[in-house]
């Protein structure tokens, strides 16, 4: 039987990070819907020193996958109802979703373990943002953690609906230049946003015309074509979301107009 203290909403549980995650995923809209869709890019969990964590990771490297318990550190509020990114247009309860807007800001991801090197744990197939405080690490056990026939409620089992996102030669050069010059990973963003429902222009980031579609990423625009028969999305090119008048205006909300000018000079003059 629960005592009065366990029923008290003001009862506090203090959690201290065991380390922090280093990742190329900086913004929330860069993260995949699930870690398994993230690909093989490497992230690193850096455990805190002087805590005997060198002993705590003993024999961890024998596991192919591990559970990471972490904090959604960029969220300051929670929502009882959330809009899932796909599967349904209706709001669902946050406890019936994996949305980050949770009362206790706790996230859980099953990631691929690459290697353990002292206090550094290298992982891939991760959807965890850079700087996330890590609260705990547990091994993934297929015999007890996997239930492939389990019902999934409102979530559709539609991995077969996934599109392959490819890039034209021009788009490849443009995305590579932006990654090298400003660490803007437009190729990763495009894949995450367009691998499911790429023609759904009811989404606020997507617009369409008779010829193609455009995906917005802050002040950048990604133009692409969709082939339903081949299940492919082809990114044609990237262009600046600023008009010529906006580029010469003094205000620079995102502090990126100089970058846009260099981009235009490089790719419109070649």
Image (spheres, rainbow, N blue to C red):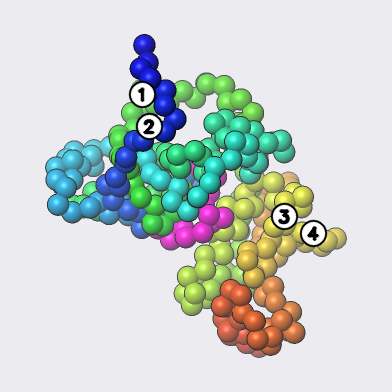
Separation (CA) of disc 4 from disc 2: 51 Å
Per the image, label 3 sits on a secondary structure element best described as: loop
Tag 1 residue:
5
Which residue in the protein does label 3 denote?
204
User: Quick one: SS at disc 1?
Assistant: loop
Does residue 147 appear to the left or right of 198 in the view shown?
Answer: left
Mark-to-mark CA distance, 1 and 3: 45 Å
The residue to which callout 4 is attached is 208
Dot 2 or dot 1: first in sequence order is 1
- Residue on which the image places disc 2: 11
Spot occupied by residue 90 in the image (x, y as percentages of width and height): 71, 35
Question: Of callouts 4 and 2, which one flags the residue occurring earlier in the amino acid sequence?
Answer: 2
Separation of marks 4 and 1 at Cα, in angstroms: 56 Å
Q: Which residues are magenta?
A: 23-34
Decide: is 85 above or below 139: below
Identify which residue is drawn at 43% across, 61% down.
24
Q: Quadrant of the C terminus?
A: bottom right
- Mark 4 closeness class: few <14, some 14–19, many ≥20 residues within 10 Å: some
């Amino acid at each position: 039987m629960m005592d009065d203290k366990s029923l008290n909403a003001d009862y506090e549980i203090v959690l201290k990070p065991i380390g922090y995650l280093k990742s190329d995923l900086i913004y929330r809209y860069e993260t995949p819907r699930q870690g398994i869709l993230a690909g093989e890019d490497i992230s690193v969990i850096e455990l805190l020193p002087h805590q005997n964590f060198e002993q705590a990771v003993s024999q961890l490297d024998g596991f192919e996958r591990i559970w990471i318990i972490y904090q959604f550190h960029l969220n300051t509020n929670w929502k009882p109802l959330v809009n899932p990114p796909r599967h349904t247009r209706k709001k669902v309860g946050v406890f019936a979703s994996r949305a980050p807007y949770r009362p206790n800001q706790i996230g859980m991801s099953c990631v691929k373990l690459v290697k353990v090197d002292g206090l550094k744990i290298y992982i891939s197939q991760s959807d965890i943002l850079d700087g996330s405080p890590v609260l705990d690490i547990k091994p993934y056990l297929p015999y007890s953690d996997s239930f492939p026939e389990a019902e999934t409620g409102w979530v559709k089992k539609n991995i077969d609906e996934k599109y392959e996102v490819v890039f034209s030669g021009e788009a490849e050069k443009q995305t590579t230049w932006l990654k090298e010059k400003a660490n803007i990973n437009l190729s990763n963003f495009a894949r995450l946003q367009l691998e499911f429902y790429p023609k759904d222009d009811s989404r606020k980031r997507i617009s369409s015309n008779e010829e193609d579609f455009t995906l917005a990423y802050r002040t950048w625009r990604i133009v692409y074509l969709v082939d339903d028969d081949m299940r492919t999305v082809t990114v044609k090119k990237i262009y600046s979301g600023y008009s010529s008048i906006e580029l010469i205006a003094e205000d620079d909300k995102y502090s990126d107009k100089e970058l846009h000018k260099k981009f235009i000079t490089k790719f419109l003059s070649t």
